[in-house]
Image (cartoon, helix red, strand yellow):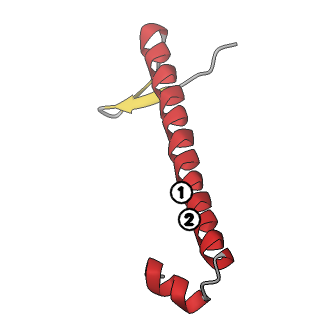
Amino acid sequence: MSEEIWVQEDGVKRKLEGAELEAFLADRAQMQVEQEAREAEEAAKVAAKQSALSKLSALGLTDDEISALVGA
């Protein structure tokens, strides 16, 4: 059973079918892939920042010195 997608245009509600439905589903899948990539990129940035802060701390810098360096 295929997923039913309904749209409303000019006050008229209709079900997407055929190529139009396939295009909608492909676009939605692509948006999901892009969203997951953005989330993974953001998580990598957070992890890299935390790693850098940990390394600075391991070098003996105080929290105040680290804050002065990174502007936090």
Report, in whole angstroms, how far the alpha carbon at label 1 lies from the one at label 2. 6 Å
The answer to whether the residues at label 1 and label 2 have Cβ atoms under 8 Å apart is yes
Residue 45 against residue 71 in the figure, above or below: above
Query: Foreground residue, 15 or 21?
Result: 21
Q: Residue furthest bottom?
A: 64
Residue 42 x %, y %: 53, 54
Res 45 label: 1
At 57% across and 41% down in the image, what residue appears?
36
At 62% across and 67% down in the image, what residue appears?
50
Q: How many marks?
A: 2
Query: Foreground residue, 7 or 39?
Result: 39
Q: Specify the amino acid type for callout 2.
A: Lys
Q: Specify the amino acid type for callout 1.
A: Lys
Q: Few, some or many C-alpha atoms within 10 Å of disc 1 (few <14, some 14-19, many ≥20)?
A: few
Q: Few, some or many C-alpha atoms within 10 Å of disc 2 (few <14, some 14-19, many ≥20)?
A: few
Residue 5 against residue 50 in the figure, above or below: above
Q: Element at badge 1?
A: helix
Left or right of 16? Residue 50 is right
At 54% across and 27% down in the image, what residue appears?
29
Left or right of 18? Residue 54 is right
- What quarter of the picture does the N terminus occupy? top right
Q: Element at badge 2?
A: helix
Residue pointed to by mark 2: 49
